[in-house]
Amino acid sequence: MLTLLLPFLINAQEQKKEPGGLFPIRQNRKYGYIDRKGTLIIKPKFDSADNFSEGLAAVKICDRINASTNTGPRIVVITPEGTNTGEFCDGKYGYIDRSGNFAVQAHFDSARSFSEGLAPVSDGIHWGYINRNGRIIVKPQYDDTWGFSEGLARVEIDGKWGYIDRTGKMVINPQFDLADGFSEGIAPVMIEDKSGYIDKTGRIVIKPQFDNAAEFSEGMGRIAIKDKWGYVDPTGQVIIAPKYEWAGRFSEGLAVVKINGMRGYINRKGDVAIAADFTGAEEFSEGMAIIMLNGKYGFIDKTGRIVIKPQFDEALPFCEGLAWVRIGGMADGKKGYIDKTGTYIWNPTN
């Protein structure tokens, strides 16, 4: 079912955000931003900070409390990398520009990145959308929302998903049990435990027949029948037969697949391009991909050669020449950025 894939899809979407030349860092339990050279551009002063998107970044300002005691609410901070620091706080979200000044003041209970000129924000109960000036364009009224993609955004009302346009008009009525964003003109949806694809009018173009389905990339969509994954074209014709234990989306001509519990890469013909020798692997970005060996993360090139040896406890894909990495535990580990030689341009800090 589509629901089984959603956690992966959410992570993938977070990872695809573009820093826009600035990268969030954490120092002395506060977030700021560096440039590609590791120069501190915006000093650490925020309690949470997201990547920049369309020139703005969501940040959180928390009420000041003594986190070392049990008095007051504990601070809950989700880092821009998607990891929970284990801290808690009452606070509000706003958006800063690349100078570090607030372009939209911090008065939202939750906030997500801008896409196509609008950003999802929450009043603590419902979700709506604002523009870059902070003006509410679509009033908070949805149980959940996500960013715009190809002119439409998916929204949830009473457990059903539909799609709105940038004016807030409901273009495709809420009727799906699950739905993902549009990619290459179509979107995966789930109806009564079966997944298929719709176009931007809501017309079903590939009938719900799969046990799971995910977004199209490079002309191919991931589908699952029972517990095996394969790929279809936009007409629904199977291009690569479902035979993998798991399959990722195509990126830079290759896709991650899981074979006998290990991960490797196939090309668009379904031929193995990089042997399934890794316990973990992610999609390619800027010619390099994250892999896991012996519980540590490193990076390979498109020939499968290890170019940065596995040594990290967590890593995110390269973006604009840098990759975020963590050494140590999720809550107390140190985080930094490396370049494509594996050299730190920002030494791990917490």
Image (cartoon, rainbow, N blue to C red):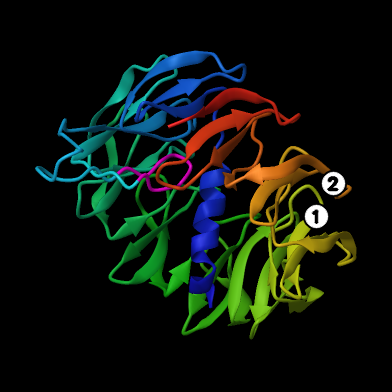
Report the residue at 78% width, 76% height from top: 238
Residue 177: quarter of image: bottom left
- The correct choice, above or below, for 150 with respect to 182 in the image is above
Residue 80 among those drawn in magenta: yes
Magenta-colored segment: predominant secondary structure: loop
Report the residue at 40% width, 46% height from top: 331
Q: Residues within 10 Å of mark 2 (few under 14, many from 20)?
A: some
User: Residue 236, position in %: x, y?
Assistant: 72, 74
Q: Residues within 10 Å of mark 1 (few under 14, many from 20)?
A: many
The secondary structure type at the circle numbered 2 is loop
Q: Is residue 181 visible?
A: no
Label 1 belongs to which residue?
254
Residue 293: quarter of image: bottom right
Q: Give the magenta part as a residue range.
A: 77-85
Distance CA(mark 1)–CA(mark 2): 8 Å
Along the viewing direction, whichever of 74 and 81 lies nearer the viewer: 74
The secondary structure type at the circle numbered 1 is loop
Q: Are marks 1 and 2 in contact (CB under 8 Å)?
A: yes
Label 2 belongs to which residue?
302
